[in-house]
Image: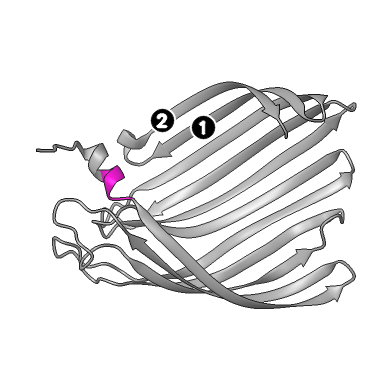
Amino acid sequence: MCIRDSDDMADFSQNYGSNEFGVGAEARILPKTWGFLRYHYGMKDYNSYFAGTTSANDSDSKWHRVNAGLSWDPGAKLSGEVNVGYQFKKYDNSFTSTGTKREDRNTWIAETSVTYSPFTTTSLTLNIARAVRDTAADTNEYFDDTGIGISLKQGIFTKFTLNAGVNYSKNEYNLPVGNARTDDNYQANIGLDYEIQPWLGVGIGYDYRKKNSNDSSFDFTDNRFMASVKIVY
């Protein structure tokens, strides 16, 4: 007989496979700037279940999304892309194993990452992301995940590289009804890498993470100090 605690059950019901297919068109609007329009169709299939959940009542879903934006040629001072869109998500099964109804979710999304390199040794990157994420196969719970981050990569002399960044994301859950869970996530990091040889490097770093939730059982603070060795072959 196998007995699982609540954390094991949650982990066991979060295994899934995901596929997405798409088409797009783009046109040059400036010498190094392109405009684009893309359409994607995707599907998510959970492959492990617990406590009465089956393929007839799990959180499998399909979605359509349309994205538009701007992209820049690699090597230009400005590179990457501004990418925003809208997603239409529908669940294959309207009810969970306990008879709770699932809500289809239509909302805006984003996958923006833009890097500005004023000098060959300096790059600043802005990331903006928004997506809808399910929590498990056996529930009707999901959350909107919206985040923004800025990172810096700075070469120092010829052998050192400074890496630093700050990120913030907000997770807005649909449950509990009337007092939905909301998480504020904070992250900051700094590190210094040293290139001993083109194929060998070492580094040190610090990473800080904090979650503030209106459900205090999910709060945490994490501090990590790291040392690394990089070998390229």
**230 left or right of 8?**
right
x and y percentages locating residue 182 in the rendered image: 39, 48
x and y percentages locating residue 89 in the rendered image: 41, 71
Please say whether residue 12 is one of the residues in the magenta stretch.
yes
Disc 2, disc 1: CB below 8 Å? yes
x and y percentages locating residue 20 in the rendered image: 50, 68
The residue stretch that appears in magenta: 10-14
**Is 220 in front, or is 30?**
30
Please say whether residue 125 is one of the residues in the magenta stretch.
no
Query: Residue flagged by tag 2: what amino acid is it?
Result: Phe
Residue that mark 1 sits on: 209
> Is residue 134 visible from the viewing direction of this image?
no
Q: Residues within 10 Å of mark 1 (few under 14, many from 20)?
A: some
Query: Residue flagged by tag 1: what amino acid is it?
Result: Arg
**Is 232 in front, or is 173?**
232
Q: Residues within 10 Å of mark 2 (few under 14, many from 20)?
A: few
The secondary structure that dominates the magenta segment is helix
- Residue 112 got which mark? none
**Is 210 in front, or is 180?**
210
**Residue at the far front in the pictured view:** 233
Residue at left offset 18%, top offset 58%: 53
Which image quarter holds the N terminus? Answer: top left
Residue at left offset 58%, top offset 62%: 110
Residue 219: image quadrant is top left
Helix, strand or loop status at disc 1: strand
**112 left or right of 1?**
right
Residue that mark 2 sits on: 220
